[in-house]
Image: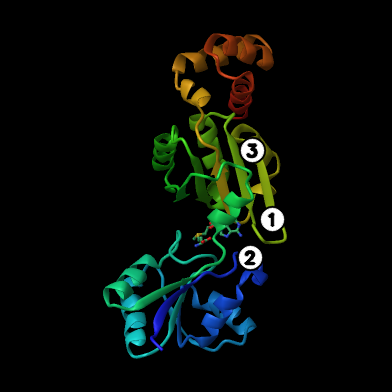
Amino acid sequence: MQTALHIVATPIGNEGDLSPRALDVLRSAHIIAAEDTRRTGVLLKSHAIDAKLVAYHDHNEEQAAETVCAAIQRGEDAVLVCDAGTPAVSDPGYRLVRMAQDLGIAVVPVPGPCAAIVALSGSGIASDRFFFEGFLPAKPRARRDRIEALKVYPHSLIFYEAPHRFADTLLDMVDVFVGGREAALARELTKTYETIRRTSLAELLDWVNRDPDQQKGEIVLIVSPAKSDEQKLLSKEALLLLTTLAEYVPARKAAKLVSSVTGVKTSILYDIIVAQRNT
Ligand code: SAM
């Protein structure tokens, strides 16, 4: 039988999500390339799998890919896994796949959990078309520029985010995307504290500020497509009118007045006022 490089998805929390096929492939592997050999070692040990583990991460990708491909060419079966989820999705892997393909090695993906898709499927947000952004830049200026660039994208957006940056990212999104836009926070998926909450960006920000536990753990954020209403709000004058009015009359009244002038939904305008009061 021809040897191959298997790209195996592993659980993102719940160990029951390791598929029987993934387990079979891991059991018959001679060599397993893993992002963190200690972490994968725990998974293998729990299934009494005793294959040779090699480290494969951002800092040694090329050299490790050569090692893995050489092993396959010697007749060994190889597997690539990442810490959790699907390799090569916001994780190292595609360079190894390319090298194997270029050497004529068969590449066999073994599907399983991927946090982005798990989150999207449970979010209640339009999923027929979507854009996977993954991690935004860590630096505030670059992050904000990237959010600006995605502002009028007409399909759902999927972000991965680190817990310590989540509130700041939401704040930028409330500012740039407009607070009334719907979003879903999908946190700790498949784990004990799994939380999926769909509401407006402004309410999400308010909620995680009031309950910082909701910023902990692993997070996917799904943002609904830009609507024509939100695109109309690109006008700085409308925003200025809204914020100025809200200083003199109750928020609902200010939202209603600006809605009658701009045609933008009152609920969206109200959320913007709430979001600005939270910043
Ligand atoms: N390759 C992985 C996949 O397919 O899911 C993603 C790896 S990426 C380095 C890690 C990020 O995925 C986390 O920071 C988080 O945004 C998301 N993530 C992973 N596991 C998750 C979980 N159980 N719940 C929510 N998000 C998760």
What's the residue at 56%, 57% (across, down)? Answer: 115
Give left or right: position of 148 versus 258. left
Badge 2 density bin: few <14, some 14–19, many ≥20, Cα 10 Å: some
Q: As rendered, which of 107 and 178 lies closer to the eye?
A: 107
**Secondary structure at numbered mark 2:** loop
Residue that numbered label 1 is attached to: 194
Q: Give the residue type that dot 2 points to.
A: Gly
Kind of element beneath mark 1: loop
Residue 13: numbered disc: 2
Q: Quadrant of the N terminus?
A: bottom left
Q: Earlier in the sequence, mark 3 or mark 1?
A: 1
Residue 99 occupies quadrant: bottom left
Q: Which residue occupies 53% across, 81% down?
A: 26
Q: Is residue 160 above or below residue 191?
A: above
Q: Tell me the residue at 45%/18% (across/down).
A: 236
* CA distance for labels 3 and 1: 16 Å
